[in-house]
């Protein structure tokens, strides 16, 4: 059997991932008392997401959305296979992992955009302030509550993301966290 190592996660994807972890943790923990740090962490997350969306289109094979975004029925079939402990191993993201990547990116985007709206209404600061006169009020009403809702939704998704990583690592007896650090997996 060929057990050579194969590069799966390129350096930009790995830097994106661990910076995202650090920035989300920073933003979540500073939301009450350290508004400057909180907003800079949020801006960095927006930059990271913009990069990742572009990289998902032009990046190498396993970074591309086309490599891991699958139909809802494939995701459900994969989850069923996990339940019966007969799930196929994937070198890139498995179908459920791919769906989670999209859910995390979408939830983080909504968290950061509503964060900008909340920053404009609560602190009269940030890039959306100048747009407030031109935009309907309902966009800004309750922005802080909506922002908090999406931040907590993201936290819940992260919980399931980590559970998914642990289950996939155990079922295929491979260390997926190490792979996200080194970039390498066993080819077989
Ligand atoms: C310490 C906690 C975390 C661990 C151990 C972890 C681990 C991992 C691993 C192993 C993968 C690759 C999954 C695979 O092999 O298919 C991954 C992907 C990913 N994780 Fe995490 N993760 C953590 C926290 C987070 C957080 C907090 C976020 C979001 C704020 C996040 C967002 C993502 C995203 C977006 C991907 C896809 C990477 C890409 O393709 O660019 N993770 N994570």
Image (cartoon, rainbow, N blue to C red):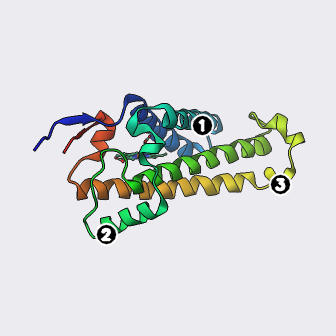
Residue topped by disc 2: 83
1 vs 2, front mark: 2
The x and y percentages for residue 9 are 35, 36
Q: How many marks?
A: 3
Quadrant of image for the C terminus: top left
Label 2 Cα crowd, 10 Å radius (few <14 / some 14-19 / many 20+): few
Residue at 50 percent across and 58 percent down: it is 156
- Mark 3 or 1, nearer chain start: 1
- Mark 3 or 2, nearer chain start: 2
- Above or below, 140 against 71 in this view is above
* Label 3 to label 1: alpha-carbon separation: 23 Å
The x and y percentages for residue 55 are 49, 33
Label 3 Cα crowd, 10 Å radius (few <14 / some 14-19 / many 20+): few
Label 1 Cα crowd, 10 Å radius (few <14 / some 14-19 / many 20+): some
Residue at 59 percent across and 52 percent down: it is 151
The x and y percentages for residue 48 are 54, 34
Residue topped by disc 1: 46
3 vs 2, front mark: 2
- Mark 1 or 2, nearer chain start: 1
Residue 105 visible (yes or no)? yes
| Mark 1 element type | helix
Residue behind label 1 places its C-beta within 8 angstroms of ligand 1: no
| Mark 2 element type | helix
**Left or right of 145 in this view: 181:** left
Residue at 81 percent across and 37 percent down: it is 129
Residue topped by disc 3: 138
- CB-based contact (under 8 Å), mark 3 and mark 1: no
* Label 3 to label 2: alpha-carbon separation: 44 Å
Answer with the quadrant where ligand 1 appears in the image.
top left
């Amino acid at each position: 059997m060929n057990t050579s190592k194969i590069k799966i996660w390129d350096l930009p994807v790995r830097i994106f991932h661990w910076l995202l972890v650090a920035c989300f943790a920073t933003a979540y923990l500073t939301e009450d008392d350290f508004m400057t740090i909180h907003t800079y962490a949020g801006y960095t997350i927006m930059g990271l997401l913009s990069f990742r969306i572009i990289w998902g289109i032009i990046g190498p094979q396993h970074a591309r959305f086309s490599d891991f975004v699958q139909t809802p029925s494939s995701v459900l079939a994969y989850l069923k296979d996990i339940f019966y402990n007969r799930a196929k191993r994937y070198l890139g993201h498995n179908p459920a992992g791919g769906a989670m990547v999209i859910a995390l990116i979408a939830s983080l985007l909504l968290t950061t955009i509503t964060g900008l709206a909340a920053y404009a209404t609560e602190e009269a600061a940030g890039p959306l302030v100048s747009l407030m006169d031109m935009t309907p009020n309902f966009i800004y009403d309750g922005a802080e509550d909506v922002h908090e809702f999406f931040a907590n939704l993201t936290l819940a998704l992260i919980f399931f993301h980590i559970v998914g990583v642990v289950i996939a690592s155990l079922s295929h007896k491979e260390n997926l966290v190490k792979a996200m650090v080194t970039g390498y997996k066993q080819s077989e």
